[in-house]
């Protein structure tokens, strides 16, 4: 029976996709259990991956700690609050190979600041993001007599990878140059849009700058 091991060798942004997309370079190595598995041919793999962020596996400078207040609370509480975060699930059909293969595992990314993972990524200034990949799925392979056989990938298959913060930032700069975006509740958006049009302001930036300036003056008075 085949046994697969997984190693993430790198990551890079995918240019010209419809939305932000990261490509993880995934090395899959096939080994067999027993001497009869020599020369084992993998026909295909229906692979599923759960990707988690392990925030406790890196340190944070004071400005990063301030940015993460919304997620983990005050720094003195991080011993209780700095827990693993589920990033996403993704899947891939791996074509036939013998021995080893290198495939692209694509992960869709969002710049929606209502999502915890976006807040986490955005708050980091440099360094690396500790990730854990948990794999499952189905392996289709050729048996000794040439018949197609099927087995499952056990859940204990996993791989660690440290994604450079610069890679995530370069991807977002590629898709949203010098831009961030917010998702607002519809009634709030309608009020903001009404204020913008009634004030004759041409851009959303000018609208928000005027509101922020008015709020700052009101607080100072």
Image (cartoon, rainbow, N blue to C red):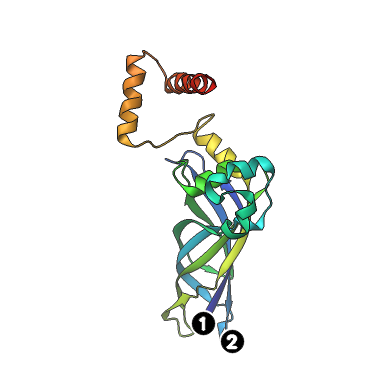
Total number of numbered labels?
2
Q: Pinpoint residue 104: horizontal percent, then vertical percent.
A: 53, 55
Disc 2 crowd, CA 10 A, few/some/many (<14, 14-19, 20+): few
Q: What SS does tag 1 mark?
A: loop
Residue designated by label 2:
34
Q: Is residue 139 left or right of residue 82?
A: left
Give the CA distance from mark 1 to mark 2.
8 Å
- The tag on residue 16 is none
Kindly identify the residue that appears in the image at 43 percent across and 35 percent down.
182
The reply to whether dot 1 and dot 2 touch (C-beta < 8 Å) is yes
Q: What SS does tag 2 mark?
A: loop
Kindly identify the residue that appears in the image at 32 percent across and 26 percent down.
191
Q: 126 or 19, which is in the foreground?
A: 126
Q: Residue furthest top?
A: 200
Kindly identify the residue that appears in the image at 60 percent across and 48 percent down.
74
Q: Pinpoint residue 9: horizontal percent, then vertical percent.
A: 63, 57
- Rendered view: 197 above or below 58: above
Disc 1 crowd, CA 10 A, few/some/many (<14, 14-19, 20+): some
Q: Pinpoint residue 77: horizontal percent, then vertical percent.
A: 61, 54
Image-quadrant location for residue 187: top left
Q: Pinpoint residue 35: horizontal percent, then vertical percent.
A: 60, 87
- Rendered view: 99 above or below 215: below
- Rendered view: 3 above or below 13: below
Nearer-N-terminus badge (1/2): 1
Q: 123 or 98, which is in the foreground?
A: 123
| Residue 189 visible in rendering | yes
Q: 11 or 164, which is in the foreground?
A: 164
Q: 33 or 159, which is in the foreground?
A: 159
Residue designated by label 1:
1
| Residue 7 visible in rendering | no
């Amino acid at each position: 029976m085949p046994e697969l091991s997984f190693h993430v060798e790198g990551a890079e942004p995918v240019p010209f996709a419809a939305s932000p997309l990261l490509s993880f370079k995934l090395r899959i190595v096939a080994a067999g259990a027993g001497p009869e598995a020599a020369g084992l041919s993998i026909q295909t793999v229906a692979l599923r991956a759960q990707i988690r962020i392990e925030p406790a596996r890196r340190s944070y400078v004071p400005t990063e700690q301030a940015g993460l207040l919304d997620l983990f609370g005050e720094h003195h509480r991080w011993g209780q609050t700095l827990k693993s975060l589920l990033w996403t699930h993704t899947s891939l059909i791996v074509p036939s190979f013998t021995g080893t293969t290198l495939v692209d595992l694509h992960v869709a990314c969002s710049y929606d600041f209502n999502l915890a993972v976006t807040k986490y990524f955005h708050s980091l200034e440099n360094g690396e993001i500790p990730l854990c990949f948990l794999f499952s799925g189905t392996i289709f392979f050729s048996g000794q007599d040439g018949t197609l056989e099927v087995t499952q990938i056990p859940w204990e298959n996993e791989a660690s990878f440290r994604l450079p913060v610069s890679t995530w930032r370069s991807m977002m700069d590629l898709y949203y140059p010098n831009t961030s975006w917010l998702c607002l509740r519809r009634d709030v958006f309608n009020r903001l849009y009404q204020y913008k049009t009634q004030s004759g302001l041409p851009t959303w930036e000018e609208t928000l700058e005027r509101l922020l300036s008015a709020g700052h003056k009101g607080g100072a008075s």
